[in-house]
Amino acid sequence: MLLLFALLAAAPVPPANAMPLTGDEQIRKVCAALGEQGGEPAPGVAESPATQALSRIYQLRVPSRGFAFGRYHEEEQELELDGSRPLRALDGALTLDLAGADDVTFRASPAQMKEWTTAKREGGLLLTVYFRASGDRCAGSPAARIFRMEGTPVWFQLEGSSGVLAATDEEGLPVDRPGALRTFRVNKVLLDTDTPRPDVGKERLVGAQGALDRCAQAARRRGSLVVGFSVQDGRVHNPQVIMDAARDEDTARCVTQALSGAALASADHASRGTASLALQ
């Protein structure tokens, strides 16, 4: 129970101090502040308007017609956000260009992908974006109340009629909901004495499965890892992560600890090996 509470407390969440952007007059004021790069702070205020505007985190709700999905990767069960087009919100008053939008992916099963695509087509899907403004000023026309802003993302989440459907972190990588059950699947354990096959040796690390699953429960996101190791007396020694598609150093460290000393079946004459793992 204590482990579960620790996992929930450590789970990433959207920023609680974000400022919602809800109208074109508010956007006009933010853009005006961004343009005051040389402005002096007001009496009693430590920061200039531009510094304040750049330091804040903003929240923007983008309607279905203001964003698009990209490719769906069925094997990884990930749905891309189409980063080739900017986000549009507030009835066209704001166009938002976000750095790294090409890298944003949401965790989605094939059934969820179809459901979300239908909901988006019917106007029932929202993309909520948390970001920091970047750049010296906004483009556009204050007189026409049309603005274009640049930003650096902090958090993305898809929302439907039932609430939050999926989320990604500041790097655009999928984030699982707190408490989601995850496990490490051992795809292959290949020793230097083996004949390569797609599923060779996948049962060799059964004894380490419990420790690997504890690593999975504490992981920030899913992905695959490849671990290289030496073999001594039929056990794993000096494991090192040589490929980390999840880009999660804490999980990689946990996996190496879980595998260190683990027993290996049919490894009496091997000297080196690799293990391919997938966090599901």
Image (cartoon, rainbow, N blue to C red):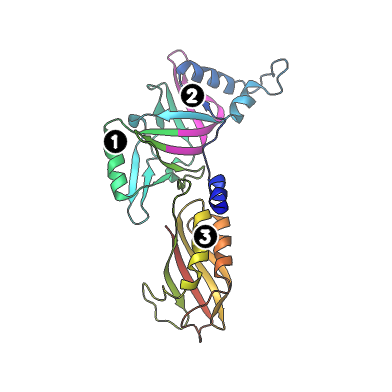
Which element is circle 3 on? helix
Q: Nearer the viewer, mark 3 or mark 2?
A: 3
- Residue denoted by label 2: 21
Which residue occupies the foreground of this view, 223 or 1?
1
Instruction: Tell me the kind of residue under disc 3.
Output: Arg
Point 59% across, 66% down: residue: 257
- Residue denoted by label 3: 214
Highlighted magenta segment, given as a residue range: 129-157
Callout 1–callout 2 Cβ contact below 8 Å: no
Which residue occupies the foreground of this view, 4 or 142?
4
Which of marks 2 and 1 precedes in the sequence? 2
Point 43% across, 81% down: residue: 194
Instruction: Tell me the kind of residue under disc 1.
Output: Ala
Residue 247 seen in render: no
- Residue denoted by label 1: 119
Instruction: Tell me the kind of residue under disc 2.
Output: Leu
Which element is circle 1 on? helix
Point 52% across, 40% down: residue: 13
Point 62% across, 24% down: residue: 50
Figure check: 163 above or below 104: above
Callout 3–callout 1 Cβ contact below 8 Å: no
For residue 197: magenta? Answer: no
Residue most toward the front? 1
Which of marks 2 and 3 precedes in the sequence? 2
